[in-house]
Image (spheres, grey):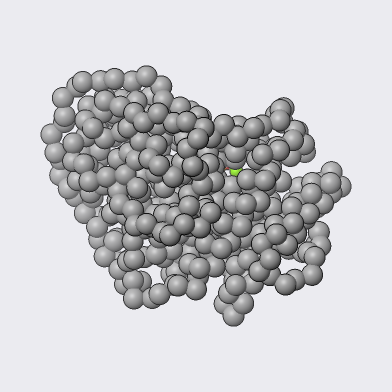
Amino acid sequence: MVILNCSRVVPKITSLSRPKFTNTQPLVSPVSRRASRAVIVAAVAVSAFSSMSYDRELAAAKKAASLAARLCQKVQKALLQSDVQAKSDKSPVTVADYGSQALVSFVLERELPSDSFSLVAEEDSGDLRKESGQETLQRITKLVNDTIVNDGSFSVPTLTMEDMLRAIDSGKSDGGSHGRHWVLDPIDGTKGFVRGDQYAIALALLDEGKVVLGVLACPNLPLASIGGNRLHSSHDEVGCLFFAKVGAGTYMQSLDGSSPIKVNVSTTDNSEEASFFESFEAAHSSHDLSSSIAKKLGVKAPPVRIDSQAKYGALSRGDGAIYLRFPRKGYREKIWDHAAGCIVVTEAGGVVADAAGNPLDFSKGKYLDLDTGILATNEKLMPLLLKAVRESLEEIPSAL
Ligand SMILES: Nc1ncnc2c1ncn2[C@@H]1O[C@H](COP(=O)(O)O)[C@@H](OP(=O)(O)O)[C@H]1O
Ligand SMILES: [Mg+2]
Ligand SMILES: [Mg+2]
Ligand SMILES: [Mg+2]
């Protein structure tokens, strides 16, 4: 295991990066709505699932994600160098990623005991089963047990290291188009988490290949808007829980348990006033391409760069109007990076599509099979956005 050079991290929750960007190019004209029609057809198909209630599942998912958020907050406050390891693909993973996955898996199985349980999750226990992983495993086990004891709602004997490995590995399902599968990113935005910035615990449920509910716990996201030119201060109250159920809208509450409020995406049809979100990490999404698209749309505000699916959460409550994601050629998007965020945005009235305007298909297993990138916005702006994307991709194909 490679230990990354990461010094003690104190959360700096107000760091929402805003590079300078201004542009006054004219609006492009509206284009054919063919591509966005594909998204609407998919929405009609999803409505077949609206008659199911999924109430038990949603309650269990909210509980699991909230508890996992508590565990992650504790770790982020005192992140030690030894808490960050590199996986074989060189991405960082912390004791909190493993602990969160074990905890979510434990809570879902306890809260929904009669259901057959299938979980598609990001982490696996491979490194923890090695000799070099024993100390990390001990710490994860203690973290998870402490969180369960502090919560007080589960009367279970102390979980062992073997219980932990089993709980982590119950996330090995491949998903697919039949039956129900939970989809979990135990910490989305691990790089943001390690930096002390934004991250999310993202949990969704697939039923027959469609996302039917999603929960996003965003411990460092301010409850107030992060959009526009609003200045942030360290006094902003943070910690948001977004949740959505098919046909039932999207809601947000504080992670401390305030009453939920219904949220909606921005309804603007004026692209000049539509600010946009993108990854903080330029390696995850081409900032050159999004800058070119923003210019074509006449967007005046600088991009809001934050880590994780907190971007989908912020979009769902109208903090900005567009989310752009353009990974380098050859990168394969995973379902756990988008399933919860996607339903949170669509149930808030938004549209999520690939760069060709096709809806995202979560039924193909662990990976999304998509054209070039991911876009999210409202229905009015999508045709305009798709045109700007197509033109930019033609003009600067080397951006990917
Ligand atoms: N080269 C790459 N291109 C695109 N996405 C990448 C990437 N490397 C990692 N990612 C994904 O980007 C996610 C974070 O998204 P964002 O850029 O919006 O913060 C990561 O989730 P994890 O942090 O769960 O591993 C990871 O799955
Ligand atoms: Mg990862
Ligand atoms: Mg992720
Ligand atoms: Mg992750």
Based on the displayed image, in which of its 4 quarters is residue 83 positioned? top right
Residue 187 visible in image: yes
The x and y percentages for residue 171 are 63, 60
The x and y percentages for residue 174 are 57, 61
The x and y percentages for residue 331 are 50, 39
Q: Quadrant of the N terminus?
A: top right
Q: Residue at x 84, y 49 (%)?
A: 134
Residue 171 visible in image: no
Residue positioned most to the left: 29
Front residue (pair 373, 247): 247
Q: Is residue 199 above or below residue 202?
A: above
Based on the displayed image, in which of its 4 quarters is residue 29 positioned? top left
Front residue (pair 3, 250): 250
Q: Residue at x 47, y 45 (%)?
A: 309
Say whether residue 341 is left or right of residue 72. Answer: left
Q: Residue at x 49, y 73 (%)?
A: 56
Q: Quadrant of the C terminus?
A: top left
